[in-house]
């Protein structure tokens, strides 16, 4: 059984906001990869549970709760799946689930951006979390997923979050909204050609990280080794709830960077230019 905490009755989770986060060296917890059998056919999408990795689980009196991810967790925008089953392994159809995330650093703790839980049906739930930093060696428990099952059973799972290979979530100061966390949802490696490029934006507001709308995310792909950019790119515009989508064009294979600036009402409001590395295969 993977590390977790259990408590009876509802929990009130309190977190302390972190003033500034720029660069932190992460260290993930070691976990043994396990595979969960079964496939869940959700409305309009198929989630292949056999392709997911189980990173934590526990058993209650009449329910089993498992935490699964696509591969591993790193310091970026990540998707986590929470599966609730009956003791016989069948999907729990009567479960009510809620969650949040907290970073325990020992002497202090803070939260991070996350979206409301999505019920995919058949006892499977999807959580989208932005890990704004990696776990740090010898500094607290690291990231913790707190869940409440049926408003009575409180469960907390330790999450192994390591440093991302390439920066995918970067904080930046802004003119009106203070510190904003910009998350690029592009994989580390992509193919050549024109393709969608997506971002999420969240501002740091005391103990919470609300999604940020009404911005334009200007992008500039650049190939340092060749000294050129590319044509036909489109800035990422808002889709509501802190989500932005645009178009990026990689004209050849090799290492690229995507330079990012935030604009509001036609005016540049980000205090620094952000740079996201990308490998084009």
Image: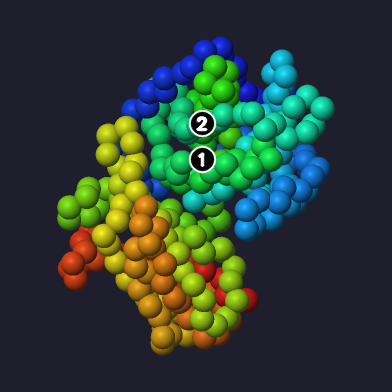
User: Dot 1, crowdedness within 10 Å: few (<14), some or many (≥20)?
Assistant: some
Q: Quadrant of residue 204?
A: top left
Q: Is residue 233 above or below residue 43?
A: below
User: Dot 2, crowdedness within 10 Å: few (<14), some or many (≥20)?
Assistant: some
Say whether residue 162 is visible. no
Q: Quadrant of residue 190?
A: bottom right
Display coloring: rainbow
For image coordinates 22% across by 50% down, the residue present is: 177
Residue contact at pointers 2 and 1, CB within 8 angstroms: yes
How many labels were placed on the picture? 2
User: Which quadrant of the rendered structure holds the C terminus?
Assistant: bottom right
Nearer the observer, 207 or 49: 49
For image coordinates 71% across by 26% down, the residue present is: 64
User: Which quadrant of the rendered structure holds the N terminus?
Assistant: top right
Q: Is residue 235 above or below residue 61?
A: below
N-terminal of the pair, mark 2 or mark 1, is 2
- How far is the residue under mark 2 from the one under mark 1? 7 Å
Residue 246 x/y as whole percent: 41, 72
Task: Return the residue at label 2.
Answer: 98
For image coordinates 52% across by 86% down, the residue present is: 251
Dot 1: element: loop
Nearer the observer, 269 or 29: 269
Residue 94 x/y as whole percent: 64, 28
For image coordinates 40% across by 47% down, the residue present is: 23
Task: Return the residue at label 1.
Answer: 117
């Amino acid at each position: 059984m993977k590390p977790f905490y259990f408590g009876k009755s509802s929990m009130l989770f309190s977190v302390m906001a972190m003033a500034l986060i720029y660069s932190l060296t992460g260290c993930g917890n070691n976990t043994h990869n396990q595979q969960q059998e079964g496939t869940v056919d959700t409305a309009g999408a198929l989630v292949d549970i056999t392709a997911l990795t189980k990173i934590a689980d526990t058993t209650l009196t009449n329910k089993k709760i498992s935490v699964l991810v696509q591969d591993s967790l790193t310091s970026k925008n990540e998707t986590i799946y929470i599966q609730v089953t009956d003791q016989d392994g069948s999907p729990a159809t009567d479960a009510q689930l809620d969650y949040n995330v907290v970073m325990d650093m020992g002497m202090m703790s803070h939260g991070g951006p996350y979206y409301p839980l999505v019920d995919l049906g058949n006892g499977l739930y999807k959580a989208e979390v932005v890990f704004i930093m990696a776990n740090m060696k010898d500094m607290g428990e690291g990231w913790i997923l707190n869940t409440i099952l049926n408003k009575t059973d409180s469960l907390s799972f330790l999450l192994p979050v390591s440093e991302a290979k390439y920066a995918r979530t970067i904080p930046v100061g802004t003119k009106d909204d203070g510190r904003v966390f910009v998350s690029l949802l592009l994989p580390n490696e992509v193919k050549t050609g024109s393709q969608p490029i997506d971002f999420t934006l969240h501002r740091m507001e005391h103990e919470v990280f609300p999604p940020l709308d009404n911005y334009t995310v200007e992008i500039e792909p650049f190939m340092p080794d060749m000294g050129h950019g590319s044509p036909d790119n489109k800035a990422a515009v808002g889709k509501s709830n802190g989500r932005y989508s645009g178009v990026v064009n990689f004209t050849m294979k090799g290492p690229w960077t995507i330079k990012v600036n935030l604009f509001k009402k036609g005016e540049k409001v980000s205090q620094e230019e952000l740079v996201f590395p990308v490998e084009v295969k």
